[in-house]
Amino acid sequence: MPTALSTCWSGRCWRESGSWRSSARTGFAGWTAARILTINQLSLAALILLYALWKLLVEVAHPGSAIPDLAGQLDSSDLGIAHELTILLYGSLIAAAAVEAGMAWYYHSRGEHLREYLARTPPWIVAMQKAGISV
């Protein structure tokens, strides 16, 4: 008997939740696509930031806890290096979250350009582009 998680991963939850409507809008369906992409990028940045901060705080509070399998095999100098590398790794993830937030700003700034384009372009061209027809 399938579990709820396996059913969800099979795509049924995706279809039933209406996410297919959101993903269809991101192709070329208007200026709301920029808003959806902005929210997606901000959500991803927040998740990366929270994960990195959580792991960083755990590592600072309990050095070597990120690599419990190796902690018993390394001496104190190697544990110090592993601790520093772990802090560097999660610090880099925090920087990656900042880059993701920059991408959210980029998509937000494209919304106005897309609105202007849709206002100036004849409707038949926009309809062709939405249908995926290229000349």
Image (cartoon, rainbow, N blue to C red):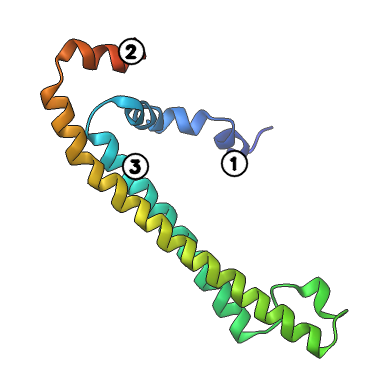
User: Neighbour class for label 1 at 10 Å: few (<14), some, many (≥20)?
Assistant: few
SS under mark 3: helix
Q: Position of residue 129 (x, y in %)?
A: 30, 16
User: Neighbour class for label 2 at 10 Å: few (<14), some, many (≥20)?
Assistant: few
**Which residue is under mark 1?**
5
**Which residue is under mark 3?**
37
Label 1, label 2: how many angstroms apart (C-alpha)? 35 Å
**Left or right: where 118 falls relative to 76:** left
The residue lying at 36 percent from left, 26 percent from top is: 24
The amino acid sitting under disc 3 is Leu
In-front residue for pair 25/2: 25
The amino acid sitting under disc 1 is Leu
The amino acid sitting under disc 2 is Ala
| Residue sitting at the far right | 73
Q: Of callouts 1 and 2, which one flags the residue occurring earlier in the amino acid sequence?
A: 1
**Which residue is under mark 2?**
131
SS under mark 1: helix
Between disc 3 and disc 1, the foreground one is: 3
Q: Position of residue 33 (x, y in %)?
A: 29, 35
Label 3, label 1: how many angstroms apart (C-alpha)? 26 Å
Task: Give the vertical position of 55 relative to 114 (above or below).
Answer: below
**Left or right: where 135 falls relative to 83:** left
In-front residue for pair 51/129: 129
SS under mark 2: helix
